Amino acid sequence: MLSIRKSALIMLILTLMGSSLLALGTHQPQAVQAEPLEPALATPRVHITVLAPTPVSENVSAVAPQGEVQNLAPAANPQSDAQTAPQSQNLQPQAAPPDDATAVLLRNAAILQEVIARRAQDPSTAFIYKFMQTYQTRGDGGGCAAVWEIVPDYASLPNWLTTPSRPEHLYSKISLYFLAAMLIKNKAVDASGCANGGLSTENEWVANNCGLSVAYAAVVQWQNRFNEVILNVAQETGVPAQLMKNIFSRESQFWPGIYFLIQEAGLGQLTPAGADTLLLWNPFFYEQFCPQVLLPEVCRKGYTNLTFEEQELLRGALMRMVDASCPLCPGGIDPYQSEFSVRVFAENLIANCNQVGQIIYNVTGKKANRTSSYVDLWQFTLVNYHAGPGCLTSAIETTAKANMQLTWDLVSANLPPSCRSAKLYVEEIIYMPAEASPPAPLPTATPTPTPAP
């Protein structure tokens, strides 16, 4: 029998994860492209890896069950309604009062507060908020440099491995078609004046050019809403801030929801295999997360000694943790959960750094700092994060057997044919576009799946 704290949690996780916990690799990748970008719009990040079938996310704009909407809506004023309703057809349109936007913000804040209070009490989601409140941060800032026992030359690092001193230095204005579509679908942007409501006629999860134009200001605001959180987490964990932002842009276009068909969730698109890596290779995180789902005495056995069912429940709960979809929240996203998930993904990258160091030691008998540079090791980590340890181990073994140095150029050239997309993935993550560069003719439309290891 599973030693689970709450049976309701079991049922929710199993229901939510459903097919998400099936083996990865069941989908066939295919290219999905948006319309050519109009010259007036900002330059998109170059995404060239083939894509999976368009993800079907949780219905974040779904209507709440009967009874819930009435409870969440602000209380009506019967007298005011009685006075205004009969004459409403005769009134001429008037300009919105100056404080109308403020009133909307206050109303949304009140709705969000009530929704979060309910979720914090619901046994199926309470563990998320408890974990966010009790989580002990690292605070040492050692990150992967400490894992690899290496002192990088911070003055000469490439831009993608830097952590700026101020959040605004992470500012970006990339054209993101999927993010624009999600903002339109969740009514954060009114694109009713565009053809097909601002969405592509071939792919409802992608904005057309008109939709992107209308949503562009919101797209820029949204992709920069996490800058301060990313910077704070980077300073506490030592994971480079710009790297995290590039990964979020590449993986999810900054939409922290869940995508059932491609079995990935959150800003960094966590997969069940990725959750396994985090829980196995990051004891600091595991020791805090596991007791939120399993009994403490069960967690003390260690992740590898848990039963398959217990491991599966932990993976499912972790996927739920980074999925910030919240149908009743204004905008369809829980802002607290989405911001906390930045920290979870930083810990996931540290777990991957640990695994990379162990892979190198297993193959060469040497510590990572004796075989590769700090920059090379981060590129290996991105391969591990995206394609899994099998691809990286094979490439390192081939390189080491040929008595070649473990540099990025040599190791990436030895990736097996089935893993070659990982090299393109790394190139896209580390690419830092110039503001004035010309727009690419075919920007990526939707988030990209992680191949099965």
Image (tube, rainbow, N blue to C red):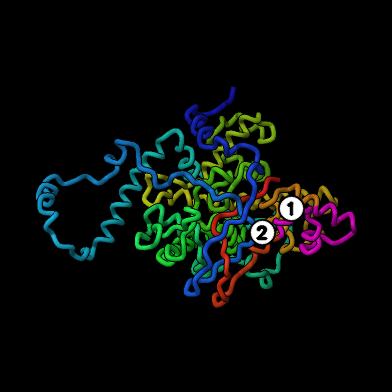
Image quarter hosting the C terminus: top right
Quick one: label 1, few (<14), some, or many (20+) residues within 10 Å? Answer: many
Task: Measuring from the top left, give residue 76's x and y in whole percent.
Answer: 19, 45
Task: Measuring from the top left, give residue 433's x and y in whole percent.
Answer: 59, 71
Q: Mark 1 is on which residue type?
A: Cys
Task: Measuring from the top left, give residue 204's x and y in whole percent.
Answer: 47, 53
- Residue indicated by mark 1: 419
Q: Mark 2 is on which residue type?
A: Tyr
Residue farthest along the top direction in this orientation:
1
Disc 2 is placed on an element classified as helix
Task: Write the start and end of the magenta stretch as one range.
Answer: 395-423
Task: Measuring from the top left, give residue 122's x and y in whole percent.
Answer: 41, 35
- Residue 425: which disc? 2
Q: Nearer the viewer, residue 195 or 96?
A: 195
Quick one: label 2, few (<14), some, or many (20+) residues within 10 Å? Answer: many
Quarter location, residue 302 = top right
Disc 1 is placed on an element classified as helix
Residue farthest along the bottom direction in this orientation:
436
